Image (cartoon, rainbow, N blue to C red):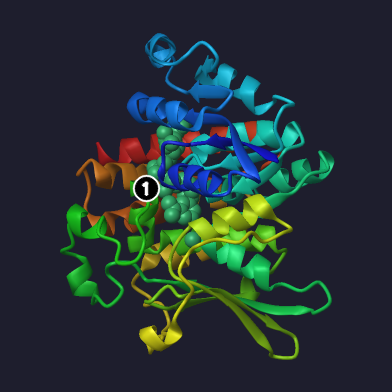
């Protein structure tokens, strides 16, 4: 029985992880669940899945949570409380499914406690890069990708075959076929309507700007030790092929399935084994046609992110921080869709580059970037 702690249990990945745990109750159990502030859903989850521990980041909700849950469930609140739970010796796998850089510190705590990290939170690796990989090595543990593309690549890789190239597929989001002029006019409501996936708001906007793909390129660079030159992006609107790898002999392997995060989540939790499911098998004869194309150059968040990744150092941290803050502005209707990439570009051009030696440096650059954006739109 694998015991699991979920950070971000009230989010899209978190709730689907709990569903997988429920479907595979002979193999998995939820040892702990942690939410940000959604006390209603957290209570419902605690009562349904009966974890030993429940954590809530928002400390003001501690007493209310305590009143609602039976005494048999341990409750922690605030960052310190959550870190205590993450460091607990009673479980094995930490599902890192907080959205954004907010997930960095708790993931670090999990690595330091020697937990296997099922990593959904790509921002952690984008900003933390080699520092995260070094920490993982030092604590003798490993990262398992939950992001569907990275899970696909991980499933296709073969240690006996030399990798030539990674081909990351992208649905292209709701504006895939838009002209540059059409893009200027899109609304928040349009951007939140992803054609294939139901996800948290931040990643849904990232999918519309293609910033998500840039973050995934940087994530793949670190996870699979692959140079940026050898990572291609392919727009594939059906989201059936979740990514591909090409070996040096030009043979290409792909992982296919209906668009659902449950398979990558379950694959990470059950690794290195596979578990039987009652999910519907992919029927390609019903799908008929799969389409592929190159991303359009006016999705600037993509090229800016690739460039930031290639430059390294503080650039990916600035890219990530500027994107997060710009998406927040967009979600709050303070800026338009096209301004997201414009703000990212300005931040990358104007914030001085900085060598990163520690996680404190990352936090500092992230904070500087956010402050820069706030000043910029005043
Ligand atoms: P979401 O917004 O649905 O959920 C986020 C979770 O994190 C919630 O439980 C929320 O309470 C918690 N949270 C948010 N901010 C927090 C903070 N400051 N402190 C503490 N907790 C906080 O997000 P999601 O779509 O589930 O995505 C989670 C992560 O997984 C992201 O990094 C995303 O890029 C990645 N991911 C998601 C999907 C998907 O299908 N949803 C696919 C691939 C990767
Ligand atoms: Mg993805």
Compared with 230, 43 (above or below) is above
Q: Residue at x 45, y 62 (%)?
A: 260
Where is residue 42? Give x, y as percent. 41, 28
Category of crowding for the residue at label 1, using alpha-carbon neighbours closer than 10 angstroms: few (below 14), some (14–19), many (at least 20)? few
Compared with 69, 236 (above or below) is below
Q: Residue at x 72, y 27 (%)?
A: 90
Where is residue 172? Give x, y as percent. 37, 71
Quarter of the rendered image showing ligand 1 = top left
Where is residue 250? Give x, y as percent. 69, 90
Q: Residue at x 61, y 37 (%)?
A: 29
Ligand 1 lies under 8 Å from the Cβ of mark 1 = yes
Compared with 342, 64 (above or below) is above
Q: Which residue is mark 1?
A: 200
The front one of 362 and 174 is: 174
Q: Residue at x 44, y 81 (%)?
A: 283
Compared with 184, 142 (above or below) is above
The front one of 366 and 69 is: 69
Secondary element under disc 1, as helix, strand or loop, is loop
Where is residue 138? Give x, y as percent. 83, 40
Which quadrant of the rendered structure holds the N terminus? top right
């Amino acid at each position: 029985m694998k015991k699991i702690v979920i950070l971000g249990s009230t989010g899209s990945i978190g709730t689907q992880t709990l569903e997988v745990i429920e479907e595979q109750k002979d193999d998995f159990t939820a040892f702990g669940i942690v939410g940000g502030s959604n006390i209603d859903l957290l209570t419902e989850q605690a009562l349904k899945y009966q974890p030993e521990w429940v954590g809530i980041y928002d400390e003001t909700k501690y007493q209310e949570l305590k009143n609602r849950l039976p005494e048999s469930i341990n409750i922690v609140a605030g960052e310190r409380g959550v870190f205590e739970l993450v460091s607990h010796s009673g479980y094995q796998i930490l599902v890192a499914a907080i959205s954004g850089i907010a997930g960095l510190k708790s993931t670090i705590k999990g690595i330091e406690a020697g937990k296997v990290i099922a990593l959904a939170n790509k921002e952690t690796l984008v900003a933390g890069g080699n520092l995260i990989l070094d920490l993982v090595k030092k604590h003798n543990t490993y990262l398992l990708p939950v992001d569907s593309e990275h899970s696909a690549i991980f499933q296709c890789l073969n240690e006996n075959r030399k990798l030539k190239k990674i081909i990351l597929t992208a649905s292209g989001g709701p504006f895939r076929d838009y002209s540059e002029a059409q893009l200027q006019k899109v609304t928040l409501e349009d951007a939140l309507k992803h054609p294939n996936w139901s996800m948290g708001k931040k990643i849904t906007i990232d999918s519309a700007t293609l910033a998500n793909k840039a973050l995934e390129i940087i994530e793949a660079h670190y996870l699979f030790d692959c140079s940026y030159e050898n990572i291609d992006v392919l727009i594939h609107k059906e989201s059936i092929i979740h990514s591909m790898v090409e070996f040096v002999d030009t043979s290409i392997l792909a992982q296919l399935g209906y668009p659902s995060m449950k398979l990558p989540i379950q694959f990470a939790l059950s690794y290195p084994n596979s578990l039987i499911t009652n999910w519907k098998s992919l029927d390609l004869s019903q799908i008929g046609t799969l389409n592929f194309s190159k991303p359009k150059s006016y999705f600037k968040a993509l090229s800016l992110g690739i460039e930031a990744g290639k430059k390294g150092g503080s650039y990916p941290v600035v890219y990530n921080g500027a994107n997060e803050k710009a998406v927040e502005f967009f979600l709050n209707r303070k800026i338009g869709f096209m301004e997201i990439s414009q703000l990212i570009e300005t931040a990358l051009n104007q914030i001085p580059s900085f060598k990163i030696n520690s996680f404190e440096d990352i936090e500092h650059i992230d904070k500087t970037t956010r402050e820069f954006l706030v000043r910029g739109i005043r």
